[in-house]
Image (cartoon, rainbow, N blue to C red):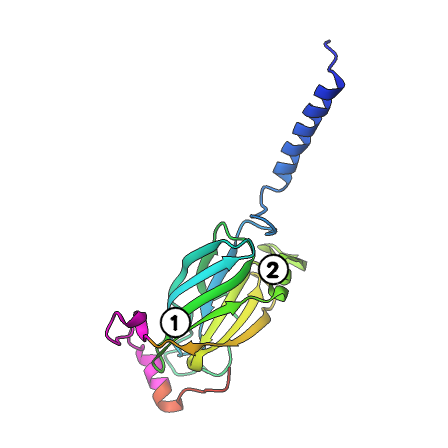
C-alpha cells in the first residue's frame, strides 16, 4: 500500500468534509436563509377585493426581484352574505415562492382596492423582527414545516397594510402595520384611462351596498 504524504492526506480529508457538509445543507437557501425559498402572499378582508398590480422585493443582500406578485389577492366571498369585512382571516394569501432571494429587506407593492375603488402604492421596510422569526426554527415543528417561511401581506381599503409571518401550522405572527399613499397616476399607472382591472363580484357589491366599507376596523 502506498502511504499518503501528510499534505495530501489533509487535502483529501478536507475535500471529504466539504462534500459531507454540502449534503448536510442541501435544503439550505441562499445566504442566511435556512430553507430553499420563502413565500410571498397577499390577502384582503372579506368582500374587499384587491388586484395587485405589482410587487417587487429587495433582499438583505441587495438583490432585487421584480414583479414577484400580481393578480387577485385571496378574499373570502360567501354567497349568503355571512362574511365579515371587519378584521382578517388567517391565511397565507394568494402568491408565490420567491426563488433565489435571501430574507426580505424591502417590499414595493402597488395595488387596486376594487371595493372603493382606489389605487395605492408604498415601499415597506421589513422589520428585523420579521427576519428573525423567519429564520428561527419552530419550537414545535409540524410535519410540513419547520420554519415560518411565509410572509403574508394584508391589503385593505384606505391603504391599510398588515404583515404577518407564518408556517403551514400554528398561528400567524403580526410583524408590521403600515399606511400606503394614493397612487396619483391611478390604476395601471394611468395606462387604462382610469379603468380598474376587474369589476366587483356580485357578492362583494351586495355586501358593500348593505354594510358599507368598515374603515377603521383593520
Residue 24, percent across and down? 64, 40
**What secondary structure is marked by label 1?**
strand
Disc 1 packing (10 Å; few <14; some 14–19; many ≥20): many
Q: Nearer the viewer, residue 137 or 107?
A: 107
Residue hosting label 2: 134
Q: Which segment is the magenta one?
A: 185-207
Q: Is residue 79 left or right of residue 24?
A: left
Q: Quadrant of residue 69?
A: bottom left
Residue 89 at least partly seen:
no
**What secondary structure is marked by label 2?**
helix
Please give the label number shown on residue 111: 1
Point 44% across, 55% down: residue: 65
Q: Is residue 187 left or right of residue 145?
A: left
Please give the label number shown on residue 17: none
Residue 3, percent across and down? 75, 12
Instruction: Say if 166 sits above or below 118 in the image.
Output: above
Point 24% across, 71% down: residue: 192
Residue 115, percent across and down? 36, 80
Q: Earlier in the sequence, mark 1 or mark 2?
A: 1
Residue 203 colored in magenta in the image: yes
Amino acid at each position: 500500500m502506498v502511504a499518503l504524504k501528510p499534505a495530501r492526506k489533509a487535502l483529501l480529508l478536507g475535500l471529504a468534509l466539504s462534500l459531507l457538509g454540502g449534503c448536510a445543507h442541501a435544503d439550505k437557501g441562499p445566504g442566511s436563509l435556512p430553507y430553499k425559498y420563502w413565500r410571498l402572499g397577499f390577502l384582503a378582508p372579506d368582500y374587499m377585493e384587491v388586484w395587485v398590480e405589482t410587487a417587487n422585493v429587495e433582499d438583505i443582500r441587495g438583490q432585487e426581484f421584480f414583479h414577484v406578485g400580481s393578480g387577485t389577492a385571496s378574499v373570502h366571498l360567501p354567497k349568503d352574505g355571512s362574511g365579515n369585512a371587519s378584521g382578517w382571516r388567517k391565511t397565507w394569501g394568494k402568491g408565490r415562492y420567491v426563488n433565489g432571494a435571501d430574507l426580505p429587506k424591502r417590499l414595493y407593492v402597488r395595488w387596486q382596492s376594487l371595493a372603493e375603488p382606489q389605487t395605492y402604492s408604498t415601499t415597506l421596510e421589513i422589520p428585523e423582527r420579521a427576519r428573525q422569526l423567519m429564520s428561527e426554527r419552530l419550537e414545535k415543528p409540524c410535519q410540513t414545516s419547520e420554519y415560518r417561511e411565509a410572509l403574508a401581506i394584508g391589503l385593505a381599503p384606505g391603504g391599510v397594510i398588515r404583515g404577518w409571518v407564518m408556517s403551514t401550522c400554528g398561528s400567524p405572527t403580526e410583524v408590521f402595520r403600515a399606511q400606503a399613499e394614493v397612487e396619483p397616476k391611478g390604476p395601471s399607472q394611468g395606462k387604462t384611462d382610469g379603468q380598474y382591472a376587474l369589476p366587483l363580484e356580485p357578492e362583494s357589491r351586495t355586501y358593500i351596498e348593505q354594510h358599507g366599507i368598515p374603515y377603521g376596523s383593520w
